[in-house]
Amino acid sequence: MAAKKVLIIMSDAAPFPFTTSAHTSLIAFAGNWYEKKRELDLVEKMKKENGFSRPKKFSEISDEELKGFAGVFIPDGHAPLTDLGDNPELGRILSYFHSAKKPTAAICHGPYAFLSTKHAGDK
């Protein structure tokens, strides 16, 4: 069985994960060196295997490309509150997943992104 892809929504308001010294300091991992190493290794693996070094802009993701994803995930954090709730392209993407009855998951502040669907019309 082929692996299923999940679209991960990221805010433009925050830097790419673990790219600033604040994100990679040991303090950010509550002093747990092993957790820091595990997460940084995971990010490097994602960059190599999935082209995750430069996330796509929402406008670069075509409706045809959306068909290749099994679901969508919106992570938490305060960054989504600054730009995801009023993004017409994200509204288009989320409306697609809803219309296609594909899973949509959001945690903590992530559900704020659902406000973007107000731009999608009656779809």
Image (cartoon, rainbow, N blue to C red):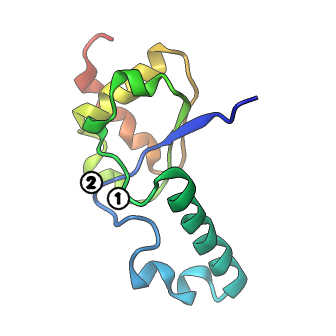
Q: Residue 38, percent across and down?
A: 68, 73
Q: Residue 8, percent across and down?
A: 48, 45
Q: Residue 37, percent across and down?
A: 65, 80
Q: Residue at x 34, y 53 (%)?
A: 11
Left or right of residue 82, residue 65 in this image? right
Dividing the picture into quarters, in which one does residue 5 lie? top right
Nearer to us in this view, 100 or 65? 65
Q: Residue at x 23, y 39 (%)?
A: 86
Q: Residue furthest top?
A: 122
Q: Which residue is mark 2?
A: 82
Q: Residue furthest front?
A: 48
Task: Kindly identify the amino acid type of the residue bearing the numbered disc 1.
Answer: Ala
Quadrant where the image shows the N terminus: top right
The circle on residue 79 is 1
Does the CB distance between marks 1 and 2 fall below 8 Å?
yes
Left or right of residue 52, residue 32 in this image? right
Circle 2 packing at 10 Å, graded few (<14), some (14-19), many (20+), is some
SS state under label 1? loop
Task: Kindly identify the amino acid type of the residue bearing the numbered disc 2.
Answer: Thr
Q: Residue at x 50, y 82 (%)?
A: 24
Quadrant where the image shows the C terminus: top left
Q: Residue at x 60, y 80 (%)?
A: 29
Dividing the picture into quarters, in which one does residue 88 lie? top left
Left or right of residue 28, residue 22 in this image? left
Q: Is residue 71 above or below residue 102?
A: below
Circle 1 packing at 10 Å, graded few (<14), some (14-19), many (20+), is some
Q: Is residue 54 above or below residue 90?
A: below
Left or right of residue 18, residue 34 in this image? right
Tag count in the figure? Answer: 2
Q: Is residue 16 above or below residue 116?
A: below
SS state under label 2? helix
